[in-house]
Image: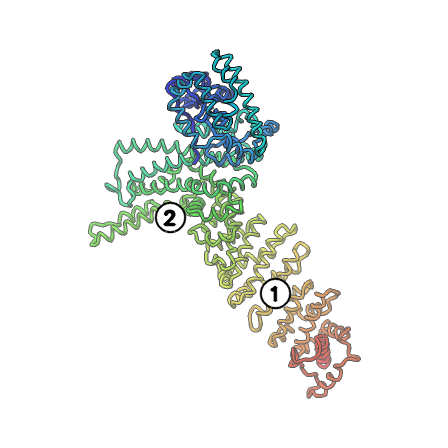
Amino acid sequence: MDILFPWRRQSLSSTSNNRHDRPHGASATSSASGSGPYHSLPHPDEAAGRYGQTGGGGYDPREYGGSMRESLTSRSVYSSVMGDGSSAEERGGVGQSGYFQPQDQLNMSDTERTQGSTVRFSDYDQHEEEPRSRRQRQSTLQSSMRSRNSAMSNDSYNQSYRNIDAGNDEYEAYASSRSFGEYAEEMTQSYRSAGLSDSFTNNKDLRSSYKSVDDERQYASLQKSFADRNQALLQQSSSSRLDVPPIEEEEEDLPPTPLRQLLDAINMSILPNTLRLSSLAQAVEFFDHRDRAMHDSELQEGAAYVLYHKLGLPLRLSKGIDLEESENSNPSPYPKNGPNHMLTYQQHLASSTQLHQQSEYDKEIAMICSCLEMVHRANPDAIAQTWDECGVEILPLLVSVLERPFQKIERAVWMALQEKANVPGSLERAAAVAVTRDMKLAVQKVTKVLAMYSLVPEAKRPMCQCEGMLRWLTRIIDTHNYNRVKPGAPVIGGTASTKSNLNLARPNDPKPEVAHQNENEKRMELASRATSGSGLYMTEAARFNTIATLTNLAALEDNRMQMLQEPGLLDNICRAVHNERSDVPKQCSALAIMNLSNGDPDHVPEMASNDMVLETLLKLIKEDNPETRRNAVVTIFNIACSDQNTVRLARYRDGTILEALTNLVGSDDPVRLHDEARANAAETIFNMSCSEIAETTDRMANHAGLLECLAVTLRSGDHTGLEVKMYCSATLRRMAELIRYPMIAQGALLSALVKASTWTSTDCIAEAFHAQASVPDNCVIMAHHHGLLNSLSRLALARGTSTEVDKVRDAAIAAIELMSRHDEARELLAHNEGIMMALTRASYGETGSLEGSMVRQSIASDFQGSDTGSYMDDSGRRGDEYDEDDASVQSRRIQVALKNLVSAM
């Protein structure tokens, strides 16, 4: 605990000089030059007077610093003799703040001083770089040596302080009554104990001359020569000892900076409350700027520590008033003397006094929170350093600030429920009046500080684990009753509710205890409904800061499942999208939902069962902001990673989500502003098509316009990205593997494949034709479909030397070969010029020549063994049973297909 001494207790002789009725222009030196050995700071009453005379402006910096420097030059401060003979200057020093400090604390570094028992910091002035360099402290080694040799421990300091404070007059009388001879005898004893007794006692001339001297001036000169002689003896005796490096004397401290004076004033302002408010008003004016470098220096000087330290006092005092109000009010849901119980005059008077005190504390808390938000407008490194030093310990303080308005709302609603249960709208008015402007401002500033801390990686987990943090952050963004004032909305505490309450307990009710229980439940329901939507009483900036904080916390994987388990957190984030007027909260909410949808490696969030989440995602997909669209689509993709979630997505509002994804993929985007969102939407559709649940794929296949949209996207020009087209072609291939005769969607699929046949960057469309032809029942339908044979021949005749083009040609030829095995489809294939040209070119390729091939005899044998004069189907010898390589197998199939078509002509 930081112990500060704003003023010192003095001796009786010096008390009259430091009375609080001293004139304003009187200097503190007069009090220091009295019999008391210490300089004392002005009493709080005197400081309050100074604030009143200056109009609340506080101390004059020149007068404040001048009085301190005059007190430092006072001989009574530096010449005070301690118990063992050392002076105050040797043991420590009088700090610029006016209280005595041990020397080891004066030599501490800036970081060590912020953690010690006295708060003392380096200069803060960016325009005086050279004076700052002259004020550098000694090294740690020298500081520790100085502490061992000359500094005074805390125990000895306290003991010496008590001795001097209690017996100052007796000590001075004793010192003045000693004769020079007694003083010399004490010196003799001290030097004898130091090992210099022989040198001192053998010097008979000095002793005899000393005894013959009676004049004080001659004694002073003799004492000087005596000290010089013994100094030489000390150097001679220490020549054989270990040499200790000399300690550099500390340079004289510079005058306190404005920041130092301000922090000292805040620290010393304890009572009364007006003194604290005046110092905080100066702090608000001082810290209100946008210079990040200056805010970095303020954090390094310890401004945040001082403000957090001062925040605890008004929070504790206001909590005491809140407890007293809770004791005076009836916590039970039943009124004391009926529903219209009136307070007495004494109770009203006490309530008004408490209200005034509470308002003063609210104002003080709001000013401290404002200062905290201002000093945290620093660079991320400075904020991270502040968190590393005090972050975890100050979280309960910030949570206490967040919970104050909501606890006030709950108490106000309960009191209104007891006193005015039958008045329409009384609960809403009580909740609205309970939250003051200062409370709103404090919550807004604290949420901004939390948003800054949430950017620190080390702070994410402790903030999420802090008790009450997620609960009150959820309440801040609770806008559940946003439409309660609109026509047709359910009226809470209104006429309908009153009528229902009046009918609860009837005189002829045979079971009054049941009616009493029902009345209690109704009151509880009214109270819960009135306290819901309490985030509407907060500012829009506070809600945005809260959403930003939750977004940053959800970026950590360990926090996601805990945040999803918090009641109402996800729903309130979604309500912000529907209720906030600004676009910034919507963008932040989309990012928060996306982070929460990632889950962890072991759990996939079950968001698909939450209609509020799905409705929010539909709204975000239609936003104009590209990043908002992308985050919404990524959220749907994360949800679709689970098969059970894909069914819910496909079912929701009869395919509304599929329609939104389809429209986004097929949207016209010439400048490619939403290219990333379109790619994510196409990937989501492909991810859903890979589901193993038949209902999902059936709904996708039967969804109107989905397959056609994918095909049209493949035919689009350069304004559609390559990634979008690749996912569209992959989805068509996947759907071709699933759809077959006699499904209704087969016609739409074949039409989509015909339109997408121009896509040759990948072999997906050609493989889709091959997948359809691999089912015997599909071959005849494919042969009769308009334009399909021409599209298939174009794929088989595709030109190019790349590997992908070769794959396209091979897949198309394989599909033609499979269709040629059926007699009904063979005639249609034989009369198509493109099909015949493709097979002929393929048969005379580099690996498919009939001349010199090893398969010519097998073809002849097949022809001879055929009863119909057509070549046999060798499909039974495909796969692993065939011993020849793949090229020979493909060549044989092409030749067989060509012979079959020639025979059918």
Q: Nearer the viewer, mark 2 or mark 1?
A: 1
The location of residue 460, given as percent across then percent down, is 50, 47
Q: Please state the total of marks drawn on the protein image.
A: 2
Q: Position of residue 482 (x, y in %)?
A: 43, 45
Picture quadrant of residue 347: top left
Towards the viewer: 77 or 873? 77
Q: Position of residue 786 (x, y in %)?
A: 65, 69
Write the residue at 55% across / 36% down: 140
Residue found 34% across the figure and 37% down from its top: 320
Q: Is residue 885 left or right of residue 77?
A: right
- Which residue, given by chain and number where applicable, does mark 2 sit on? 490
Q: Is disc 1 surrounded by few (<14), some (14 to 19) or many (20+) residues within 10 Å?
A: many
Q: Is residue 240 left or right of residue 25?
A: right
Mark positioned earlier in the residue sequence (2 or 1): 2
- Give the amino acid at mark 2: Pro
**Quarter of image, res 808:** bottom right
Given residues 324 and 589, the one toward you in this image is 324
Q: Quadrant of the N terminus?
A: top left
Secondary structure at numbered mark 1: helix
Residue at position x 40%, y 34% in the image: 314
The quarter of the picture where residue 494 lies is top left
Q: Are marks 2 and 1 in contact (CB under 8 Å)?
A: no
Give the alpha-carbon distance from disc 2 to disc 1, as whole Å.
49 Å
Q: Which mark is residue 732?
A: 1
Q: Indicate the amino acid at tag 1.
A: Leu
Decide if residue 479 is in sight here. no
Residue 192 lies, in percent from the top left, at 48, 26
Q: Give the colour scheme of this rendering.
A: rainbow
User: Front-most of 73 and 580?
Assistant: 73
